[in-house]
Image (spheres, rainbow, N blue to C red):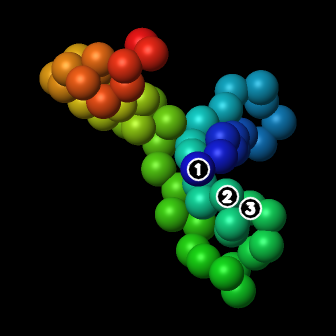
Amino acid sequence: MVGHQVERTKGTKDYIRYYQCGNFRQKGSAVCNSNMIHADYAEACHGTLHNSIDVKQFCPLA
């Protein structure tokens, strides 16, 4: 997944952040779909998962 941003309203500096498929970004729709998800939602889910597992069990260097 790679970062992507879209202007909320044309001509403004206000953006909506997304994550999208890296292959779609590099190679186009022949390879896969965009599968864009809101960055805030993805980061909140990641934080929830990170807090609910024992990180040292999966990543001993953490």
Observer-nearest of 47 and 6 = 47
Q: Where does residue 10 sit, x and y in percent of width and height?
A: 77, 42
Residue that carries the numbered disc 3 in the rendered image = 25
Residue at x 57% of width, y 43% of height? 18
* Location of residue 45 by image quarter: top left
Q: Amino acid at mark 3?
A: Arg
Q: Earlier in the sequence, mark 3 or mark 1?
A: 1
Residue at x 37% of width, y 25% of height? 59
Is 49 situated above or below 60? below
Q: CA distance from mark 2 to mark 3?
A: 5 Å
Residue that carries the numbered disc 2 in the rendered image = 22
Count of marks placed on residues: 3
Within 10 Å of disc 1 (Cα), the crowding (few <14, some 14-19, many 20+) is some
Q: CA distance from mark 3 to mark 1?
A: 9 Å
Q: Where does residue 39 sit, x and y in percent of width and height?
A: 50, 36
- Secondary structure beneath dot 1 equals loop
Q: Quadrant of the C terminus?
A: top left
Is 45 situated above or below 50? below
Q: Amino acid at mark 1?
A: Met
Tags 2 and 3 touching, CB below 8 Å: yes
Q: Amino acid at mark 2?
A: Gly
Tags 1 and 2 touching, CB below 8 Å: yes
